Every structure is written in C-alpha cells, then in structure tokens.
C-alpha cells in the first residue's frame, strides 16, 4: 500500500504561509513591496485592530488585467523572474511568487485592480485559497487589496498573535522599513481611522527626518563612501543619540532592508571610546552593490543577505563611519579611570583641620550615596516643601540676624544618609559589620563568614519599599524646572505611550511627541536622578520590545525592579557603620533577602569548616 501522496493546494499554501505570513505586519510588508514593484508613487496603508480585523493597501501602480489578477494568487506565479539566472540580477523587491498565495490561504482577500487604458477593472474575492467570485468593476488605475480576518481558518495561529499594542508596533516597524528604503514613494499609515504617518515623496534626508523626527534628525551626521566594491551613504547619530536599547539601526542593501549583526559590529567599532560599550549608536545606512554580488534568496523574509565580499565591505563601512566622526571632531575620550588612580580630597572650609577624626573624603562619600538613592519616603535634596517652616523660624528670631554689620555664611547642609540607624533602632542580634573593597559587607554568622553584596542588598530593600508604597499611592516625585527631552524611535514611542499611566504611578511623568519623535520627562521619582530615570525608561522599552516584559501583565513589577536597580547604592561607595547597620536590618527584615528581584544572589556564606580547611 502506497503511503506517500500529494498535499492539496490549500494545505500546501497554509504550510508555506507559516514562513511568509507570520503576523499582520508580514501582510503589510509583502503588499507594500508588491506595490513598489508595480511602479507605485503613492501607497496608503489602513489597518483595523492592528491588522487582525482588516488591512487595506491602496496603490497607484500599473495594476493588473483579469488573467494576471487571478494568476497572481497561485503559488510561484510571478512577473519578476523567469529563470534561475534572474535570481543573480534582481532589481525588484519580490521574486518568489509566494506572498499573495500565502495571504489568500489564511485570510479573506478582496482585490480591485485596473490597468491604464482599460475602462473597467476586475474585482476578485478569495477566501482560504478558494475563489469566491470574479467580476468586472469600476476602480482607479492601480490595485486595492483588502485583507480581512487574518488566520480565520488557522485558530492556533490567531491565538498566538500578541495584543493589539504589540502587533501595532510590528506593523509600524515593517511600514517604516519599507518607507525608509524607498523615499521616492509617498506612503501613509492609518490605524482605526487615525493617521500615524504621512510621508510625502522626498529624498533620503527628508524621509529619515520624517521617520526619526526633527529632534533626532538634527543630531545625525552624513556618512558617505564610494568605491568599486560598494557605495555607502546615509546618516549616523552623534554620541548623544546612543542608547542602551536598539530601534534606530537600519541597513539597506540595494533599497532592501536587511539585518546584519556583522555590519552592525563595523559601525559600533568605529564608536569605541566615544560611547559606553553597552550603548548602540543610531544609524541609517544605505549600501549599493552590483546585484550579481549579493544573494537575497536566503530566507522567505528576505532580510538576510549574503555578499560576495562582505569582509571588504565591513572595512569600508567601518572606515567611512570613523572618518565621519573624525571630520566632525568627535574623537575618543581619554580614559583616566584606572584602579591605581590617586584620589585627591576636596578642601572643606567648614570642617576642622585639626581634629583627629577629620575625614576629607566624607563629602565625596555622601555625594555618591545621595546619587545612589535612598529608601522610599526619604525627602529628596530637591524637595523644598519645608521652606515655610524655615522662613517662619527666621521671622520668629525677631530679625536680629538681618541687622547691618551681621555676617552671613552659607551653612553646609547635613548630608543625607542611605539609612538612619537611630530611626531603625539598634538590633541586639546584629553582628559587627565590615565593608570590604567598597563592594561587600562582611560579618559573622552562625554558619561561618557571611558576605553581602551591598548593591544587590540595597536593590532588594528598595524594591520591597517601592512595591509597598505603590500599592496604595503613587511614588513621590519632583517636578523638573526644564523638561528633559530625549529622541526615540517610532517603536519605542508606541511602547511609552502605552506605559504613561504605569510610569506616572511610579513617579515618572513622560510626555510623548510623535511629530518630533521625542519623549519629555517633566517629573522624576525623588529617589532617582534625571539620567537614571532616562536610563530606566530606555531599559524598560527594550524589555517590552524583546518580550522580556509583558507590557500589560508585568510592567508594574518591571518598573519597580528597574527603579530599585538604578537607585541602589553603587559599587565603590564607602558606607558608614550606621549605613551598613541600617542596610543589614532592612535586608534581614525582607522575606526574599537571598536574591534580588531579578534572581541574582545577595548573600553568600563561607562555612567555618571550609575556612579551617584553608589552614
């Protein structure tokens, strides 16, 4: 009995659709690229419910006749190539002939199209690869695709779609990639009747400015190189635009978006010594090579491209970026931070120079401690709500101090402590604590020598305090005199728009400006500096983009974790005995004192017998 048989076309198309059409964004990418291949100069994209309900793509391209319209939905039917040799001389976006067949296999598709010179067009309706109807119709020149109920016949695939917010981020991402690759085509995107992007025909500079926002565009530098191997053009960001998160990194090869960790390294290497090693610069780089020297037929998504001489292109790209930075006087900074440096104390005129216990480093220690943050509820340095009390006290003195001849000096404020031992109370069970290498706290335990990581311990204590505070009210924040404005990519702006309420509960007021492509911080938590709050938002958007944090379910805990991480006392900060005592007591009172919110170990114990064995 024979067991091998041919699959029906509908089943084969659904299998192929699994590679080509992964989500609504895939449909938009394929239809926009088809419109560009058809010579369109204006493409309008409209989606409902992030594309799961309906996607419309309207173009003014060449259109199709009745026979072509029907044949276009067959697998491996294409007008782009006719032989295998054509794969090595591609000048079109599509060539596999799988996109329309894959879309029609998992959705209900309606196509209205007309060619120039024909009075009537054709209307074709297909559902799950089955042709429902085909009839003449009146329609403008070009094509109008309407894709409804994506994955209606594949329930498992539909259930695996993310939330509308997450899917809309993918839609925006794919739309912008096509828009950036083809600035000579006017494109627009609307969601549920609201226009998100309307990018007219222009040059590369105008298109990048329209996508990145004017604020970001002002911080971009032109990069250019023209060789016999590759022609490179585009823009790179100044060091100020570098972020811990990705999102503004774009490579295009022959007007086709591509992903390449290899070429990304060429760009980032040119920034060595200019930006922190964990940051990524922004760039919009266009590479043009001979079509015969690259292969785009690697994956159905066509975002992986192989070059004949990628090593030479790597060196040219790296040199072009480095030359651009050098021409704009952006040079690597000399690193004076070494473990053998000599620390010179600052002179404190208010401190006694004769006392034996004078510590010239006290001011530096307390400044570092203040920057590192404190427990929730501690008044911040920027908190001036007690000015009425200060003023009333001065007035009660009768104004004697204001008499002529009286000399006033600006008193040095009492430095704030990480932990107040008097407020916490002495613990009879607390062992004697010693700081080691300004990183660990050592003490004796019943089992041996206990080693506590000071940063992780403080992170755990802060996390517990933040969660306890946010259960009933918003975290205390301080308004900024001038907003802190940061350029961000379109995908990150979408994420932050969804997080505004959660950020507000955490004491962060962020205003999103989609037109400028910026986020303005107008208030930050009392326990965090502006720069730490900015880093927190960048980390959070990156976690949401990669799926590490569920934007709806886990965002409150994620914000608390990141606030604690940024606010905790850093390594290298010298802690007083009172501060160590307070930190120890708070940590021991925590139910989860063994690990940080992210699961990192806080406490290690070296057993007595292990110590004895060393000797």
Image (cartoon, rainbow, N blue to C red):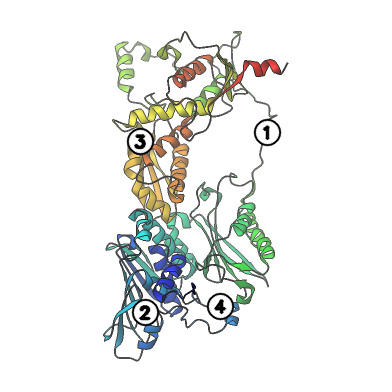
Establish if 227 lies above or below 141: above
Q: Mark 2 points at which residue?
A: 60
Query: Tag 2, which secondary structure?
Result: loop
Query: Tag 1, which secondary structure?
Result: loop
Residue 165 sits in which quadrant? bottom left
- Mark 2 or mark 3: whose residue is earlier in sequence: 2
**In x, y percent, where is residue 212?**
45, 58
Disc marking residue 507: 3
Q: Residue drawn at (52%, 69%), measured in percent from left and top?
A: 256
Front position among marks 4 and 2 = 4
595 relative to 111 in the view: left or right: right
Q: How far apart are marks 4 and 2 (CA)?
A: 23 Å
**In x, y percent, where is residue 64?**
38, 85
- Which quadrant, please, contains the C terminus? top right
130 relative to 313 in the view: left or right: left
Q: Name the residue under label 4.
A: 90
**Answer yes or no: do the residues labelled 1 and 3 have beta carbons within 8 Å?**
no
Q: Distance between the residues labelled 4 and 1?
A: 53 Å
């Amino acid at each position: 009995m024979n067991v091998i048989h041919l699959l029906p076309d509908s089943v084969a198309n659904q299998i192929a659709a699994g590679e080509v059409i992964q989500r609504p964004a895939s449909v938009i990418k394929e239809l926009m690229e088809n419109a560009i291949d058809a010579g369109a100069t204006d493409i309008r994209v409209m989606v409902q419910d992030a594309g799961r309900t309906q996607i419309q793509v309207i173009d003014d391209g060449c259109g199709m006749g009745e026979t072509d319209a029907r044949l276009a939905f067959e697998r491996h039917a294409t007008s782009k190539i006719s032989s295998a040799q054509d794969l090595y001389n591609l000048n079109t976006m599509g060539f596999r002939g799988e996109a329309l067949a894959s879309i029609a296999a998992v959705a209900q598709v309606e196509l209205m199209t007309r060619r120039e010179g024909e009075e009537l067009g054709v209307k074709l309706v297909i559902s799950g690869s089955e042709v429902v109807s085909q009839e003449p119709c009146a329609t403008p020149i070009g094509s109008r695709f309407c894709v409804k109920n994506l994955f209606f016949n594949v329930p498992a695939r539909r259930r695996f779609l993310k939330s509308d917010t997450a899917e809309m981020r993918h839609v925006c991402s794919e739309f912008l990639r096509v828009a950036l690759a083809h600035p000579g085509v006017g494109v627009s995107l609307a969601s549920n009747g609201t226009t998100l992007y309307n990018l007219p025909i222009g040059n590369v500079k105008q298109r990048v400015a329209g996508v990145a926002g004017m604020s970001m565009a002002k911080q971009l530098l032109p990069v250019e190189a023209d060789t016999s191997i590759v022609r490179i053009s585009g823009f790179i960001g100044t060091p100020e635009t570098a972020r811990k998160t990705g999102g503004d990194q774009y490579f295009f090869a022959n007007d086709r978006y591509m992903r390449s960790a290899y070429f990304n390294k060429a760009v980032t290497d040119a920034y060595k010594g200019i930006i922190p090693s964990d940051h990524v610069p922004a760039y919009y780089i266009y590479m043009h090579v001979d079509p015969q020297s690259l292969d785009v037929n690697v994956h159905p998504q066509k975002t992986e491209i192989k070059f004949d001489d990628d090593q030479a292109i790597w060196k040219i790209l790296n040199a072009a970026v480095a030359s651009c930075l050098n021409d704009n006087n952006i040079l690597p900074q000399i690193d004076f931070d070494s473990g053998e440096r000599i620390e010179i104390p600052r002179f404190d005129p208010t401190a006694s120079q004769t006392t034996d216990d004078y510590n010239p480093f006290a001011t530096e220690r307390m400044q570092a401690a203040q920057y590192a943050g404190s427990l929730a509820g501690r008044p911040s340095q920027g908190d001036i709500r007690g000015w009425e009390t200060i003023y009333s006290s001065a007035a009660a003195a009768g104004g004697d101090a204001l008499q002529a001849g009286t000399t006033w000096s600006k008193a040095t404020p009492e430095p704030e402590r990480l932990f107040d031992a008097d407020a916490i109370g002495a613990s009879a069970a607390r062992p004697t604590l010693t700081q080691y290498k300004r990183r660990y706290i050592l003490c004796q335990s019943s089992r041996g020598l206990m080693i506590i990581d000071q940063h992780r311990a403080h992170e755990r204590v802060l996390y517990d305090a933040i969660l306890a505070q946010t259960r009933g009210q918003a975290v205390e924040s301080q308004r900024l005199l001038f907003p802190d404005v940061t350029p961000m990519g379109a995908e990150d702006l979408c994420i932050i728009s969804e997080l505004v309420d959660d950020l507000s509960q955490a004491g962060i007021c962020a205003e999103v400006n989609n037109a400028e492509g910026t986020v303005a911080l107008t208030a930050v938590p009392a326990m965090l500096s502006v720069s730490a709050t900015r880093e927190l938002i960048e980390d959070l958007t990156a976690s949401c983009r990669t799926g590490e944090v569920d934007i709806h379910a886990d965002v409150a805990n994620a914000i608390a974790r990141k606030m604690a991480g940024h606010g905790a006392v850093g390594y290298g900060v010298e802690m007083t005995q009172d501060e160590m005592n307070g930190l120890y007591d708070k940590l021991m009172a925590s139910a989860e004192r063994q690990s940080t919110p992210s699961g990192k170990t806080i406490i290690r114990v070296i057993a007595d017998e292990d110590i004895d064995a060393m000797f």
